[in-house]
Image (cartoon, rainbow, N blue to C red):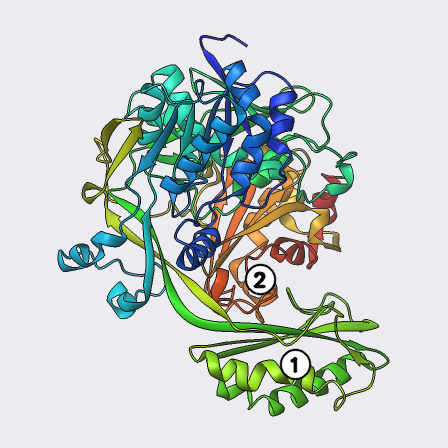
C-alpha cells in the first residue's frame, strides 16, 4: 500500500457484546492505521439509557474498556488511532474511564482522548418543540408531544465532521456518543486524504466502506447464506478496509484468520438494514445502486464506482421513552401430540392469568415451531418451548396476575410439561421504547473537547437538500435504466429465461442469497440473484405480493421493493413486522434476523434455464 495515498482501517466490533478479543486480534494480526468500533444499534441506546437511569455513572458500552485494556498500550506505541461511539448516552463518563485506564496502564503520557459532544438534545427538547420541531415519529406519524412526559433521552445522529476535527486536533483515542455507524470509518479517510466537504462521490465511498465493515464479521463470512463454503469459523477474521485517495477501496482481513471475503459476503452486508438505494447520512447521500464489486484475489474484494449526492437537510434523532413493563416466561411441552397440547397449555395459562384482553399486549410462541416465523415443516416436532410474554403500563398487574401463573400452572396443565431449571417467577422489567424522528440540521451543533481545548463543529453542509425520496424503478422501466446488464448480456438464452418454458420447482435458496435486518418496526430483506439470469427472473417474478403472502402471519403493514441491479439484488421492506421493534416487541425475533432464511425456504417455480445458469 502507498502510505501517502492509502489508509488501513480495521473494524473490531459490530455491536455491544461482540467478541471481546477482536481488538487484540486486529492489532496483533498485522499493520493497521485506525481501529474503529461500532456499539450503538438502535436498541442499544434504549438499554444504555435504562442503565443510566439506575446509575448516573453508567450509560456507555463498558466492553470498550475491556478491549482497550488489551490494546491501548500497543496501539499507542504503534501509532494506531482508536475511534468508537462507545460513549452511548454518557460519553463523558466513558472518556473519563479511558483516561483512568491509561493511567493504570502507564500510557497516560501517550494517550490524547478527544470527546465528541452535541448529540444530546434532551435538555433542549421543550425549546425545540416550542419552535416548531415536532419530532414526529417516522413510522407512526405521532408528534413527540404525545409522550413528552415519558421521554428519557434524545440523541441526534452526528456525522463524521466532529471526528475529523478531533483528528485534526491531534487525538489518538476518540470517544463519541450517537454518531452514525459509518462515520467512524469515513472520518479517517477524510482526514488522511483531505477530501472536500462537498466531494460527494468520495464521501459516498467512505459511507459504503463504513457500512460494509460496521457489523464486523458479517462481511467476512459471518451470517452468510452459503455458510457451508466458509471452511473455518475459528478465529474468524474481522474486516479491514484498504482505502485510497480516489475513493476506491478493498475489503479484506488479516492473513491466516478464519472466515471468507468474497463478492457475495460483501453484497449481503451492503443490503443489511438498507432501505432505498439512496442511503442517507449526515455527510452525504450514498447511491448504493452505483457500487461496483470485484474479486481482487483471495479474501479481497475491490469496491469502485461509488457515486454520491448532497446530504438531506434534516438529521435523524433517536429518542427513548418509558413505555411500561414486560415479562416473559417459558415452559417446555413434549410429545406426542405436542402442538395440540401446547395450544391447550397456552389456553389454560392465559385463562389463569386473567385473559389475553387484560393486558396491553400479549404473545404466545412455540419455540421450535413458529417462534421466529411460520412453520417450515408439515410434521410437528417432538417438543416445543412455549414462550408467553406480556407488556402493560401497570407493573403491579403483571407481577400480580402474569408472573405467578408461569410457574403456578405447572401441575395443573397438560402432561409432558416442564420448565427450565433456572427459571423462577418472571419479573417485570421496564420497557424503554425507541422513537425515531427528524430535525433541521441547522439547529444542531457539535463540539470536540481535547484536554482544555474545545472546538465547535457546525453541522450545516453546503448543498444540503430536502430528501427527494427513493429512486423507485418499477418493472415497466427499461432494464438499462436499472444500471445492470441488458437481457442480451446474460449468460444463457435470455429468450428462454423470459419465456418460462420447461419449469421446475425449487426453494429460493437455490437461486438466491439473502440477509435481513431491522429499523424500528420495519424489517428489510435483501435478496441477491446468484447469476444475472436469476436477477432478471427475480425482477419479473419475486414480487411484493409474493413476499407479502409468504409473511402474511408476520407483516401487518405494507411491503416495498427496491431494485439494486448493480448488485443483482432486490431489497424488500416489511413494515409493521417486528411487533413494535427493539425493546417494545414481545416476539422472540424482534430484529428480523431469521426473516431472510425463511424467505429463502419459499418454493418457487422457475424456468430450467434459470436454474441451469447457477448449476
Cα–Cα span, label 1 and label 2:
38 Å
Q: Position of residue 290 (x, y in %)?
A: 45, 32
Could you say where residue 422 lies in the image, as x and y percent from the top left?
A: 72, 68
Q: Residue at x 44, y 80 (%)?
A: 394
Q: Quadrant of residue 413?
A: bottom right
Left or right: 601 as drawn, with respect to 291: right
Query: Where does the image place residue 574, in percent across and percent down from the top left?
Result: 50, 60
The structure residue drawn at horizontal position 43% and vertical position 42%, both measured from the top left corner, is 277
On the picture, is 442 further left or further right than 232? left
Q: Quadrant of residue 423?
A: bottom right
Quadrant location of the C terminus in the rendered image: top right
Viewer-proximal residue, 297 or 178? 178
User: In this view, which residue lies farthest toward the left?
Assistant: 131
Q: Nearer the viewer, mark 1 or mark 2?
A: 1
Relative height, residue 17 to residue 257 (above, below): below
Compared to residue 144, the image places residue 30 above or below, namely above
* Dot 1: element: helix
The dot on residue 546 is 2
Q: Is residue 302 visible?
A: no
Residue bearing the label numbered 1: 406
Q: Residue at x 32, y 67 (%)?
A: 150
Circles 1 and 2 in contact, beta carbons < 8 Å: no
Instruction: Please tell me which residue lies in front, 309 or 440.
Output: 440
Q: Quadrant of the N terminus?
A: top right
Amino acid at each position: 500500500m502507498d502510505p501517502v495515498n492509502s489508509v488501513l482501517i480495521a473494524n473490531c466490533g459490530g455491536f455491544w457484546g461482540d467478541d471481546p478479543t477482536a481488538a487484540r486480534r486486529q492489532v496483533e494480526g498485522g499493520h493497521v492505521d485506525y481501529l474503529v468500533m461500532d456499539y450503538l444499534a438502535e436498541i442499544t441506546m434504549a438499554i444504555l439509557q435504562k442503565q443510566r437511569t439506575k446509575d448516573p455513572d453508567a450509560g456507555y458500552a463498558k466492553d470498550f474498556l475491556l478491549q482497550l485494556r488489551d490494546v491501548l498500550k500497543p496501539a499507542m506505541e504503534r501509532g494506531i488511532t482508536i475511534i468508537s461511539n462507545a460513549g452511548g448516552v454518557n460519553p463523558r463518563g466513558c472518556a473519563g474511564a479511558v483516561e483512568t485506564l491509561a493511567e493504570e496502564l502507564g500510557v497516560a503520557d501517550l494517550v490524547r482522548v478527544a470527546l465528541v459532544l452535541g448529540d444530546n438534545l434532551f435538555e433542549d427538547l421543550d425549546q425545540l418543540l416550542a419552535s416548531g420541531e415536532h419530532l414526529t415519529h417516522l413510522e407512526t406519524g405521532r408528534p413527540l408531544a404525545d409522550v413528552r412526559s415519558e421521554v428519557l433521552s434524545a440523541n441526534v445522529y452526528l456525522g463524521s465532521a466532529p471526528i475529523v476535527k478531533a483528528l485534526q486536533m491531534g487525538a489518538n483515542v476518540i470517544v463519541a456518543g450517537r454518531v452514525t455507524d459509518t462515520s467512524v470509518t469515513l472520518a479517517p479517510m477524510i482526514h488522511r486524504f483531505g477530501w472536500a466537504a462537498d466531494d460527494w462521490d468520495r464521501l459516498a465511498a467512505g459511507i459504503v466502506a463504513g457500512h460494509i465493515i460496521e457489523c464486523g464479521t458479517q462481511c467476512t463470512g459471518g451470517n452468510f447464506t452459503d455458510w457451508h463454503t466458509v471452511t473455518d469459523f475459528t478465529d474468524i477474521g474481522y474486516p479491514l478496509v484498504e482505502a485510497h485517495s480516489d475513493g476506491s477501496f478493498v475489503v479484506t482481513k488479516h492473513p491466516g484468520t478464519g472466515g471468507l471475503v468474497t463478492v457475495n459476503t460483501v453484497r449481503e452486508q451492503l443490503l443489511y438494514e438498507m432501505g432505498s438505494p439512496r442511503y442517507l447520512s449526515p455527510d452525504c447521500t450514498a447511491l448504493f445502486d452505483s457500487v461496483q464489486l470485484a474479486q481482487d484475489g483471495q479474501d479481497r474484494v475491490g469496491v469502485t464506482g461509488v457515486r454520491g449526492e448532497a446530504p438531506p437537510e434534516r438529521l435523524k434523532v433517536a429518542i427513548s421513552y418509558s413505555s411500561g413493563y414486560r415479562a416473559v416466561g417459558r415452559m417446555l411441552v413434549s410429545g406426542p401430540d405436542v402442538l395440540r397440547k401446547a395450544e391447550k397449555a397456552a389456553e389454560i395459562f392465559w385463562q389463569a392469568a386473567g385473559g389475553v384482553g387484560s393486558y396491553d399486549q400479549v404473545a404466545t410462541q412455540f419455540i421450535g415451531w413458529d417462534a421466529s416465523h411460520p412453520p417450515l415443516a408439515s410434521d410437528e416436532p417432538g417438543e416445543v418451548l412455549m414462550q408467553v410474554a406480556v407488556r402493560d403500563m401497570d407493573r403491579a398487574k403483571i407481577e400480580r396476575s402474569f408472573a405467578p401463573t408461569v410457574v403456578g400452572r405447572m401441575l395443573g396443565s397438560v402432561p409432558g410439561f416442564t420448565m427450565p431449571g433456572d427459571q423462577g417467577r418472571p419479573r417485570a422489567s421496564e420497557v424503554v421504547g425507541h422513537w425515531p424522528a427528524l430535525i433541521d440540521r441547522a439547529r444542531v451543533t457539535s463540539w470536540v473537547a481535547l484536554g482544555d481545548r474545545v472546538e465547535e463543529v457546525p453541522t450545516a453542509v453546503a448543498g444540503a437538500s430536502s430528501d427527494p425520496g427513493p429512486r423507485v424503478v418499477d418493472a415497466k422501466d427499461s432494464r438499462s435504466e436499472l444500471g445492470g446488464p441488458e437481457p442480451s448480456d446474460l449468460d444463457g438464452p435470455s429468450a428462454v429465461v423470459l419465456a418460462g418454458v420447461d419449469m421446475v420447482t425449487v426453494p429460493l435458496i437455490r437461486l438466491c442469497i439473502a440477509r435481513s435486518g431491522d429499523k424500528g418496526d420495519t424489517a428489510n430483506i435483501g435478496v441477491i440473484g446468484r447469476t444475472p439470469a436469476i436477477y432478471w427472473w427475480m425482477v419479473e417474478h419475486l414480487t411484493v405480493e409474493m413476499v407479502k403472502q409468504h409473511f402474511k402471519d408476520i407483516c401487518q403493514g405494507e411491503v416495498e421493493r427496491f431494485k439494486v441491479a448493480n448488485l443483482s439484488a432486490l431489497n424488500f421492506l416489511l413494515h409493521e413486522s417486528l411487533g413494535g421493534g427493539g425493546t417494545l416487541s414481545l416476539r422472540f425475533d424482534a430484529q428480523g434476523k431469521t426473516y431472510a432464511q425463511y424467505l429463502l425456504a419459499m418454493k418457487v417455480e422457475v424456468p430450467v434455464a434459470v436454474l441451469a445458469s447457477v448449476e
